[in-house]
Amino acid sequence: MYANSRNVLIFVILCCVSIVSSYNVDTRRVIRHRGPPNSMFGFTVAAHYERGDNMVLVGAPKAKTNQPGVSNGGAVYKCDVSRNDSCQQIPFDRRDGQPKTSELACDDVETAVDVR
């Protein structure tokens, strides 16, 4: 009876082990990206692949932009996955290389709340 209970217990444990999956995090070669203070940099993060390049898209809903009349319009950054602090802000609302002018100035609209 004892041997049979032990075999059942071992079987249950082995079944549970096969269900568990793990996630490998490399702690020796860390890549760290930092954004502007108080920008909520990292609020959203998405892995992205474009033209042979792996990158991370990072949202910063309270980031300052270069748009005239807008102080905290939010921003999305493109970051290299192989180098520290290699993020570049992705420009939005541009026409022919010139900032778009409008009567509507959107301040604190949290542009980068959802990055996919």
Image (cartoon, rainbow, N blue to C red):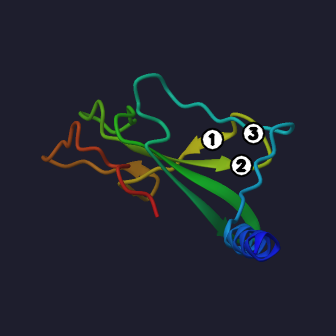
SS class of the residue under badge 3? loop
| Residue neighbourhood size for the residue with mark 3, other residues' Cα within 10 Å, grouped as few (<14), some (14–19), many (≥20) | some
Q: Nearer the viewer, residue 100 or 61?
A: 61
Q: CA distance from mark 3 to mark 2?
A: 9 Å
Could you tell whether 90 is left or right of 54 in the image? left
Q: CA distance from mark 1 to mark 3?
A: 12 Å
SS class of the residue under badge 2? strand
Q: Position of residue 107 (x, y in %)?
A: 21, 37
Q: Amino acid at mark 3?
A: Ile
| Residue neighbourhood size for the residue with mark 2, other residues' Cα within 10 Å, grouped as few (<14), some (14–19), many (≥20) | some
Query: Residue 30 appears in which quarter of the rendering?
Result: top right
Q: Which residue is mark 2?
A: 80
Q: Position of residue 27 (x, y in %)?
A: 80, 38
If you read the primary sequence from the N terminus, does the residue marked by circle 2 or circle 1 appear first? 2
Could you tell whether 115 is left or right of 77 in the image? left
Tell me how many marks there are: 3
Q: Are marks 2 and 1 in contact (CB under 8 Å)?
A: yes
Could you tell whether 56 is left or right of 6 in the image? left
Q: Amino acid at mark 2?
A: Asp
Is the residue 63 above or below the residue 90 in the image? above
The N terminus lies in quadrant: bottom right
Is the residue 3 above or below the residue 30 in the image? below
If you read the primary sequence from the N terminus, does the residue marked by circle 3 or circle 2 appear first? 3
Q: What mark, if any, has residue 31 been given in the picture?
A: 3
Q: Which residue is mark 1?
A: 87
Q: Residue at x 41, y 30 (%)?
A: 39
Query: Residue 50 appears in which quarter of the rendering?
Result: bottom right
If you read the primary sequence from the N terminus, does the residue marked by circle 1 or circle 3 appear first? 3
Q: CA distance from mark 2 to mark 1?
A: 7 Å
Query: Residue 85 appears in which quarter of the rendering?
Result: top right
Q: Residue at x 85, y 39 (%)?
A: 29
Q: Residue at x 74, y 35 (%)?
A: 84
